[in-house]
Image: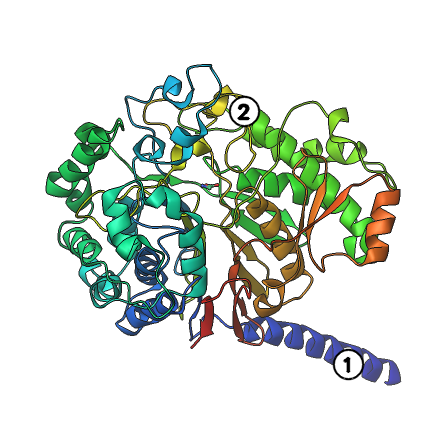
């Protein structure tokens, strides 16, 4: 009898455990019930919520946020540029990346980017119409609305159109970055008229109106992408670009196509990472780095050893970036090999436990980087749809070239190609023939919009930042997996290594003086940067507690992360 009672007790305990595990599983929330948006500007975040309140989903909100950023943060992104939009639909788990990256015009000629003496012509690469590739952003927004949104473009573009027409007061970051590009903006009459009233950078308190951009957005709202890529606006763009020495044609615009790409996915410490495939280099580099790091228990290591392994992973991933990557529609790339755990195991085996690997001991080539432009936003809607977008006009104010009557700058994305093989671009990145410009091809990007999907916690993470963008996303993902919330990790001090120069660059506060000494003793050169970098905007949803979080990088002046 006692035995039977004991068995029943064990059985009861078993049932309690099973039920409580079952109850825990059931306790996971199916839907957030609220939404979270983090973007580079309060007005853009508000625009996203405005569209959600009208019955839109995360993808409609993305159109509203992206187009509003085009108005209020033109130095970073806009309809004269492009972007990568990563989507996860809650109803069926469908994941896709909308590639609205710019393309080279058919008449592209690498000689245009050389001086008479054969040296790179950096001015043509980054300033004026020759630096501008065919924009992808308008087609991306129209595609997003048509295929995944619930609302017409007339609704999702409405906040941007309103703000462009009524105006807003640019923040100190906008004005400071305007000052950095003043000299080049002054070269082009329509650019100067738009951004430099009386030829000067305006003072804080200035109301910036762009009625021309409002009209272009209205045309897109009425006609979809045809409103931009065909007809009057297209003709105006082509005529003006050609008159100023560029090479665009009506066919280049008419033939522009958004591409749907299958995201790159892999697992790390129980989390499923969904990220950007080529033409971004970011996802491949992220997979390489996290695959290498999966061989270490990072949380058991002291800080210096942890930084050592992370930096060695960065070094190796950046070596491969330059060597292999380009536009997947034009070049074959060993993506499966580069992202394979066995490849990472080989790279890991080359890392010494207590010594830096000098970059020149690894075959390949690369060079330095900078960059604080581009814009990233992250959205989770009340149904659990995820949207993560990084969009850009490339460097600050792109080419600075405004076509009269349009109200927006054209990108200078041609500089993301390896215009002169082996010579660095604005980020210090060099590339191989794989990333040389071909008619209609897309330049290699570093943009790395990423989802981090665990059983209980989901994170949506990304940032601008040139080539540092990739390592910032890595550090954000590691912090999220360690349990930090977006509000915390977006502000963490950052460090970066990109193979060459063979230096760890670090923001102030990333390392203590003792940590710097310990890293130097292992053979590293640590260079503390005066500037801070990046503008991370991340959101998360904890399916166990139901809590949502939104964090906007404190480095951005008007960034805004909101849950409601
Ligand atoms: N234009 C910056 C990037 O795509 O990486």
- The numbered mark at residue 150 is none
Q: Is residue 263 visible?
A: yes
Quadrant of the image for the C terminus?
bottom left
Identified at 42% across, 53% down, the residue is 179
Q: Position of residue 189 (x, y in %)?
A: 24, 44
Vertical placement of residue 349 versus 459, above or below = above
On screen, residue 509 versus residue 415, left or right, reads: right
Question: Crowding at label 2, few (<14), some or many (≥20) Cα neighbours within 10 Å?
Answer: some
Per the model, the C-alpha gap separating discs 2 and 1 is 76 Å
Camera-side residue of 239 and 161? 239
First in sequence, mark 2 or 1: give its number.
1
- Whether pointer 2 and pointer 1 mark residues with C-beta atoms closer than 8 Å, the reply is no
Q: Position of residue 368 (x, y in %)?
A: 61, 36
Is the CB–ligand 1 distance for label 1 below 8 Å?
no
The total number of labels drawn is 2
Q: Position of residue 431 (x, y in %)?
A: 53, 26
View extreme (top): residue: 117
Q: Which residue is mark 2?
A: 423
Identified at 26% across, 26% down, the residue is 247
- The numbered mark at residue 8 is 1
Q: Secondary structure at mark 2?
A: loop
Question: Which picture quadrant has residue 443?
Answer: top left
Q: How is the image coloured?
A: rainbow
Identified at 22% across, 42% down, the residue is 403
Is the CB–ligand 1 distance for label 2 below 8 Å?
no
Q: Is residue 39 visible?
A: no
On screen, residue 237 versus residue 6, left or right, reads: left
């Amino acid at each position: 009898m006692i035995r039977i009672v004991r068995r029943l007790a064990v059985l009861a305990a078993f049932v309690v455990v099973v039920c409580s595990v079952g109850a825990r599983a059931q306790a996971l929330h199916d839907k957030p019930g609220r939404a979270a948006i983090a973007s580079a500007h309060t007005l853009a975040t508000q625009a996203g919520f405005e569209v959600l309140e009208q019955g839109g989903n995360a993808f409609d909100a993305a159109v509203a946020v992206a187009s509003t950023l085009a108005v209020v943060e033109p130095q970073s992104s806009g309809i004269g540029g492009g972007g990568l939009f990563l989507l996860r639909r809650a109803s069926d788990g469908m994941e896709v990346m909308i590639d609205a990256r710019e393309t080279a015009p058919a008449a592209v000629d690498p000689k245009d980017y050389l001086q008479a003496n054969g040296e790179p012509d950096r001015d043509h690469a980054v300033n004026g119409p020759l630096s501008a590739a065919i924009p992808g952003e308008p087609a991306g927004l129209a595609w997003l609305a048509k295929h995944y949104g619930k609302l017409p473009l007339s609704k999702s573009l409405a906040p941007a159109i309103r703000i462009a027409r009524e105006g807003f007061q640019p923040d100190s970051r906008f004005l400071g970055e305007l000052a950095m590009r003043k000299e080049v903006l002054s070269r082009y009459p329509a650019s100067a008229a738009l951004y430099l009233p009386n030829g000067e950078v305006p003072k804080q308190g200035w109301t910036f109106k762009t009625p021309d951009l409002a009209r272009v957005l209205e045309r897109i709202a009425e006609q979809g992408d045809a409103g931009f890529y065909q007809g009057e606006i297209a003709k105006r763009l082509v005529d003006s670009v050609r008159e100023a020495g560029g090479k665009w044609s009506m066919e280049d615009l008419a033939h522009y196509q958004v591409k749907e790409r299958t995201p790159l996915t892999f697992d790390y410490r129980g989390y499923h990472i969904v990220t950007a495939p080529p033409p971004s280099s970011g996802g491949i580099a992220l997979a390489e780095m996290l695959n290498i790091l999966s061989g270490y228990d990072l949380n058991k290591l002291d800080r210096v050893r942890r930084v050592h392994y992370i930096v060695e992973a960065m070094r190796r991933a950046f070596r491969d970036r330059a060597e292999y990557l380009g536009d997947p529609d034009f070049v074959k790339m060993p993506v499966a090999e580069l992202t394979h755990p066995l490849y990472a195991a080989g790279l890991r085996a080359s890392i010494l436990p207590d010594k830096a690997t000098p970059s020149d001991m690894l075959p390949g080539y690369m060079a330095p980087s900078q960059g604080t432009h581009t814009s990233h936003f992250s959205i989770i809607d009340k149904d659990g749809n995820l949207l993560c977008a990084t969009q850009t006009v490339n460097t600050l104010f792109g080419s600075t070239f405004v076509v009269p009557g349009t109200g927006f700058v054209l990108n200078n994305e041609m500089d993301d190609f390896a215009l002169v093989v082996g010579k660095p671009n604005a980020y210090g990145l060099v590339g191989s023939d794989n990333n040389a410009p071909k008619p209609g091809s897309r330049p290699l990007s570093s943009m790395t919009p990423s989802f981090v999907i665990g059983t209980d916690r989901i994170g949506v993470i990304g940032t601008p930042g040139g080539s540092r963008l990739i390592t910032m996303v890595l550090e954000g993902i590691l912090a999220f997996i360690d349990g930090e919330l977006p509000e915390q990790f977006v502000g963490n001090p950052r460090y970066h290594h990109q193979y060459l120069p063979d230096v760890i660059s670090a923001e102030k506060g990333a390392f203590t003086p003792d940590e710097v000494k310990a890293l130097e003793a292992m053979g590293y050169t640590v260079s503390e940067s005066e500037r801070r970098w990046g503008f991370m905007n991340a959101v998360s949803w904890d399916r166990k507690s139901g809590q949502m979080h939104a964090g906007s990088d404190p480095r951005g002046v008007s960034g805004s992360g909101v849950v409601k």
